[in-house]
Image (tube, rainbow, N blue to C red):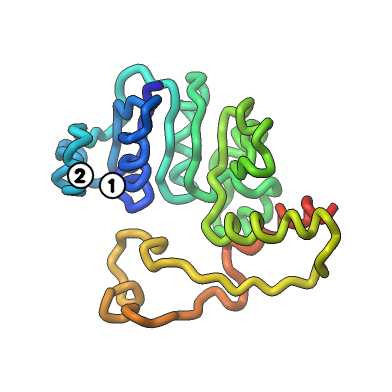
């Protein structure tokens, strides 16, 4: 299977390239980057030198599957031509995770750029939607906190063995904030420490609520 990655130069895209390059049934054929176009992938990420690809401004060649690792809004726009050409995709951003696009606009503070694609998407948690995922054009990769929360709580809610008033206390690594420079993500600021954020409402909250509400019936 020939696979392409849009925006391989972010942390998520780079890790995706590492995993796909070692998959026995995947031929990682094309990678793009908003920065680094024209450079060898190994120049940007030395640990990926063995992949031997050059970062391109646009996907090239005949592809069977595409992953987008762009930020929200930009990702959906980049996938329009890909989906219309008949290529199945996985979107790592939040663009297709929420069924209600008004909720998406409220939490991500932008109108959904491609609402016409939302109907062709599925929430990509295989433990819950395996059969639907295999038939979908766009698979929305779940967020980090939602993945941990939903996998842990959905079975218990579905079985009716826990109360629906739930508190989730979740932690994640700072790499989840991306490669952009920021004082709050400098190593000297975060080493051996924990920083609370999003206490009044994290962007992943509606995603968790959506799936757990469905699980609870």
Residue 203 picture location, percent across and down: 57, 63
Report crowding for label 2: few under 14, some 14 to 19, many 20 or more residues within 10 A (C-alpha): some
Q: Is residue 92 above or below residue 204?
A: above
* C-alpha gap between disc 2 and disc 1: 7 Å
Give the total number of marks visible in the rendering. 2
Q: Residue at x 68, y 43 (%)?
A: 128
Q: Is residue 193 above or below residue 11?
A: below
Residue 49 picture location, percent across and down: 17, 40
Label annotation for residue 74 = none
Of the 4 image quadrants, the one containing the N terminus is top left
Q: Quadrant of residue 122?
A: top right
Instruction: Give the mark nearest the N terminus, 2 or 1.
Output: 1
Q: Residue at x 85, y 52 (%)?
A: 217
Q: Quadrant of residue 152?
A: bottom right
Q: Residue at x 85, y 60 (%)?
A: 160
Look at mark 2 in the image and give the residue it sits on.
Answer: 36
Label annotation for residue 9 = 1
Q: Is residue 202 above or below residue 67?
A: below
Q: Is residue 154 left or right of residue 107?
A: right
In depth, the one of 93 and 127 nearer the eye is: 127
Q: Quadrant of residue 2?
A: top left
In depth, the one of 173 and 178 nearer the eye is: 173
Is label 2 in a helix, a strand or a loop?
Answer: loop
Residue found at the far top of this picture: 62
Report crowding for label 1: few under 14, some 14 to 19, many 20 or more residues within 10 A (C-alpha): many
Question: Are the residues at dot 2 and dot 1 in contact (C-beta closer than 8 Å)?
Answer: yes
In depth, the one of 77 and 180 nearer the eye is: 180
Q: Residue at x 50, y 80 (%)?
A: 196
Residue 101 picture location, percent across and down: 66, 48
Residue 24 picture location, percent across and down: 37, 28
Is label 1 in a helix, a strand or a loop?
Answer: loop
């Amino acid at each position: 299977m020939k696979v392409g990655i849009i925006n391989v130069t972010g942390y998520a895209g780079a890790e995706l390239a590492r995993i796909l390059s070692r998959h026995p049934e995947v031929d990682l054929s094309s990678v793009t980057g908003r920065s680094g176009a024209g450079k060898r992938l190994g120049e940007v990420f030395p640990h990926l030198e063995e992949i031997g690809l050059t970062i391109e401004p646009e996907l090239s060649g005949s592809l069977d599957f595409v992953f987008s690792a762009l930020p929200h809004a930009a990702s959906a726009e980049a996938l329009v031509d890909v989906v219309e050409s008949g290529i199945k995709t996985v979107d790592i951003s939040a663009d297709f995770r929420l069924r209600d696009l008004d909720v998406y606009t409220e939490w991500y503070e932008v109108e959904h750029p491609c609402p016409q694609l939302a109907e062709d998407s599925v929430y990509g948690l295989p433990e819950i939607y395996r059969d639907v995922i295999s038939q979908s054009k766009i698979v929305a990769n779940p967020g980090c906190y939602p993945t941990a929360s939903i996998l842990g709580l959905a079975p218990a809610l579905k079985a009716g063995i826990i109360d629906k008033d739930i508190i989730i206390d979740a932690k994640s690594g700072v790499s989840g904030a991306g490669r952009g420079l920021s004082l709050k993500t400098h190593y000297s600021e975060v080493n051996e420490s924990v920083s609370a954020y999003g206490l009044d409402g994290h962007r992943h909250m509606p995603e968790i609520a959506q799936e757990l509400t469905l699980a609870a019936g």
